[in-house]
Image (cartoon, helix red, strand yellow):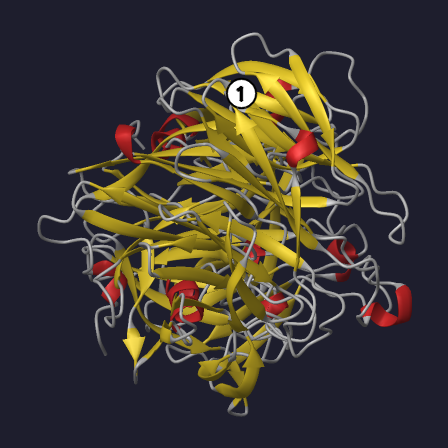
């Protein structure tokens, strides 16, 4: 078993990036504007002094501005509406230039470039393009604006097969003091070059080197073109080629299993960036027939110098960011790429769209593989990456606007240790231990710093992960599945606690509303190696009242014949008073069920409160995670403590009045410590435990990176100052 290279790459004198701020795109949208309920930050650019950011908001049909005078406290800087969907943006001196698509019919694409004064935010001019712009780039002197006209295909027409005309092109527009000279624009044809649909080039991204040469990616055509922006001449073009991969997961089956291989995958590059005047990097997302899950280094003469192979997939798995639901497609989907020279280091930033991760490498020079430096937690679906070396900053725009708002995240380079990741996995036989969706946590009864986590129904097989928190980041040292008759099985593991014999109790959440096959809540007894020994169902009288928010945590008190299992129910069931949830007890020796009531805090309007964990801290004292279902600074994530001293749980099925737990008191508001990473407060704080030395830890559930930004926070709370019990 090897320590993951991700945990060792940040040692020595290597400077690293840490997130210093998060800006929500929605905060820039003017009051009352209702083009769409969403707002997104997709492509982001910086002013020459790096003190202003501009991003495209396609959903709100405008450009958002961010005041970055203090990068740790970005402020809303205004919003400029445009008549269409902005697709790309650059800043030339004091002028903002954005490509805007007005396409409503794929056969009649349209769009324009808009010029906006950076200080006044007034529109200076527009320039019709006669097609749909997808990307912009400036040359070194700001003399020429390169505009990729994609004229994208209709993916619903004939299953998206190309050619679908009109063809795309590269349009070159001279600039004067940042303003475009529309009358002098040149249209560079890119037809007749690629082996794939040569009549229908669909250029995607463009970047220009210091020699005035543009590298253009033709994604669907799996091709590159090098264009002289001064003359409009195509000086070179070549295929992006194919790649063979080993050690990847190609099956969408609810399990991360990196044992598959693939041959002849077309790279189909998306973003490109120059490393120097001879070499460039490409993020090979794929879109049409391929996608290789890689990024590559090419020489502009067409020579492939290096390809990442399965490296990005393994990095995502090692950090809990692998999107298993995309295994059958394009995996992590490397989409964004950026290069910036920070001091003497030429750094490469690779944005993994589906993994919601940015991976940082150092360019080691021609003919050498780049050095892995670190990973950065991005918002959901990182799209736009902009380096600001003069301020030691990296900016990442994440376009997805779901439960958490679309964001622009700011990272600063310095000597401080990397704050992320909080948790990585070790390598076994050269491959990372895949993980994600941690939903319950238990402390080892004897060894300080050792914990056991359980995964939930995001994966088809339930697994127990052994975690060593004495290392930083904490390390998953081994994992094993729950099994029946030696075969892996799946439950919805939401709670786990270790028993005296080294085995475990696991709480599996049911869903009686699931169709066509309802799922029952279960208390599962398993051996130390994961073999299922007993599945205990709730009494019928409880099952009849259950809803889909069921068992969420499990703990024990007593031992031997007096062992009692305690279970937390997440939300109110059918027969519960509003704002009251059940705490269940199970006497192992007598198989007797009991019940208490726990009063929840009142949720904010539109939210709900519930329990996500229960941990015994004495014979009659318990700590629970009480949380709502929202993100952000106004959400509620807390630890509460209660007592059962002098209280006898009501026997389930009897007419006895159900008693309420005693002395509920707030132990800790978790939000402040969750915000120390300068992101946003994550929704699912689901796991808490205290180790054999009294050190407390909690972990968030990243939902297996499905509809989530994939970020997992494992936060050490130290010794809690608990009231006498």
Asked whether, in this view, residue 39 is left or right of residue 348, the answer is right
Residue 58, image x and y in percent?
71, 35
Asked whether, in this view, residue 241 is left or right of residue 342, the answer is right
Q: Is residue 189 above or below residue 83?
A: below
- Residue 534 sits in quarter: bottom right
Placement of the C terminus among the 4 image quadrants: top left
Looking at the image, which is closer to me, 177 or 254? 177
Question: Is there any visible trace of residue 571 in the rendered image?
Answer: yes
- Residue 50 sits in quarter: top left
Q: What element carries label 1?
A: strand
Looking at the rendered structure, the number of numbered marks drawn on it comes to 1
Taking the spot 62% from the left edge, 36% from the top edge, the residue there is 629
Question: Is there any visible trace of residue 632 in the rendered image?
Answer: no
Q: In this view, does 97 lie above or below 509?
A: above
Q: In this view, does 511 lie above or below 92?
A: below
Taking the spot 80% from the left edge, 65% from the top edge, the residue there is 518
Placement of the N terminus among the 4 image quadrants: bottom left
The residue sitting at the top extreme is 120
Residue 120, image x and y in percent?
57, 7
Q: Name the residue under label 1.
A: 95
The residue sitting at the left extreme is 12
Q: Is residue 514 above or below residue 96?
A: below
Residue 211, image x and y in percent?
37, 49
Category of crowding for the residue at label 1, using alpha-carbon neighbours closer than 10 angstroms: few (below 14), some (14–19), many (at least 20): many
Taking the spot 52% from the left edge, 83% from the top edge, the residue there is 483
Residue 114, image x and y in percent?
67, 26
- Residue 131 sits in quarter: top right
Looking at the image, which is closer to me, 84 or 357? 84
Looking at the image, which is closer to me, 94 or 332? 94
């Amino acid at each position: 078993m090897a320590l993951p290279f991700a945990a060792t790459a940040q040692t020595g004198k290597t400077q690293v990036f840490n997130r210093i701020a998060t800006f929500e795109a929605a905060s820039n949208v003017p009051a009352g504007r209702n083009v769409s309920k969403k707002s997104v930050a997709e492509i982001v650019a910086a002013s020459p002094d790096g003190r202003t950011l501009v991003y495209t908001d396609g959903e709100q049909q405008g450009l958002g501005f961010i005041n970055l005078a203090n990068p740790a406290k970005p402020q809303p800087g205004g919003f400029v509406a445009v008549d269409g969907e902005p697709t790309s943006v650059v800043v030339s001196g004091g002028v903002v230039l954005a490509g805007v698509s007005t396409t409503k019919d794929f056969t009649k694409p349209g769009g324009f470039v808009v010029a906006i004064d950076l200080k006044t935010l007034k529109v200076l001019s527009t320039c019709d393009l006669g097609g749909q712009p997808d990307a912009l780039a400036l040359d070194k002197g700001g003399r020429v604006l390169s505009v990729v006209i994609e004229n994208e295909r209709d993916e619903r027409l004939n299953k998206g097969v190309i050619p679908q005309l009109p063809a795309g092109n590269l349009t070159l527009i001279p600039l004067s003091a940042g303003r475009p000279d529309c009358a002098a624009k040149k249209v560079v044809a890119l037809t007749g070059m690629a082996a794939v649909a040569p009549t229908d080039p669909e250029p995607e991204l463009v970047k220009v080197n210091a020699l005035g040469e543009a590298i253009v990616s033709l994604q669907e055509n799996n091709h590159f073109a090098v264009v002289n922006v001064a003359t409009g001449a195509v000086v070179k073009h070549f295929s992006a080629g194919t790649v063979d991969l080993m050690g990847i997961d190609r099956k969408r089956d609810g399990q991360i299993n990196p044992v598959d291989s693939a041959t002849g995958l077309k790279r189909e590059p998306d973003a490109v960036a120059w490393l120097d005047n001879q070499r460039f990097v490409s993020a090979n997302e794929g879109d049409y027939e391929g996608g290789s899950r890689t990024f590559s280094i090419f020489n502009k003469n067409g020579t492939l110098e290096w390809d990442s192979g399965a490296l990005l997939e393994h990095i995502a798995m090692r950090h809990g960011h692998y999107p298993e639901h995309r295994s059958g497609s394009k995996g992590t989907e490397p989409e964004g790429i950026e290069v910036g020279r920070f001091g003497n280091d030429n750094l490469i930033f690779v944005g993994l769209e589906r993994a919601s991760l940015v991976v940082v490498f150092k360019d080691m020079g021609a003919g050498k593989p780049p050095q892995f430096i670190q990973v950065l937690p991005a918002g959901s679906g990182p799209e736009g990456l902009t380096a600001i070396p003069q301020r030691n900053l990296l900016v990442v725009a994440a376009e997805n606007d779901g439960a958490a708002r679309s964001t622009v995240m700011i990272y600063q380079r310095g000597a401080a240790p990397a704050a992320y990741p909080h948790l990585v996995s070790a390598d076994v036989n050269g491959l990372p231990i895949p993980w994600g969706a941690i939903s319950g946590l238990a402390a080892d009864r004897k060894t300080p710093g050792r914990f056991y986590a359980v995964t939930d129904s995001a994966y088809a097989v339930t697994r127990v992960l052994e975690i060593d928190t004495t290392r930083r980041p904490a390390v998953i040292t081994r994992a094993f599945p729950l099994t029946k008759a030696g075969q892996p099985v799946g439950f919805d593991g939401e709670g786990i606690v270790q028993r005296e014999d080294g085995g475990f109790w696991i709480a599996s959440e049911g869903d009686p509303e699931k169709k066509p096959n309802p799922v029952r809540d279960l208390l599962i007894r398993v051996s130390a190696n994961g073999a299922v020994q007993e599945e205990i169902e709730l009494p019928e009288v409880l099952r009849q009242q259950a809803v889909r928010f069921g068992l969420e945590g499990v703990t024990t008190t007593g031992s031997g014949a007096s062992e009692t299992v305690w279970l937390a129910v997440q939300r109110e069931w059918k027969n519960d008073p509003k704002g009251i949830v059940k705490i269940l007890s199970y006497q192992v020796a007598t198989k007797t069920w009991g019940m208490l009531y726990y009063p929840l805090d009142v949720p904010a309007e539109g939210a709900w409160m519930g329990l996500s964990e229960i941990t015994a801290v004495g014979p009659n004292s318990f700590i629970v995670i009480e949380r709502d279902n929202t993100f952000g600074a106004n959400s509620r994530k807390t630890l509460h403590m209660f007592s059962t001293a002098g209280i006898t749980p009501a026997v389930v099925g009897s007419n006895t009045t159900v008693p309420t737990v005693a002395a509920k008191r707030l132990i800790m508001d978790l939000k402040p410590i969750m915000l120390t990473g300068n992101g946003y407060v994550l929704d699912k704080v689901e796991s808490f435990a205290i180790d054999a030395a009294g050190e407390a830890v909690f972990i968030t559930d990243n939902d297996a990176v499905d509809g989530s930004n994939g970020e997992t926070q494992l936060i050490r709370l130290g010794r809690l100052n608990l009231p006498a019990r």
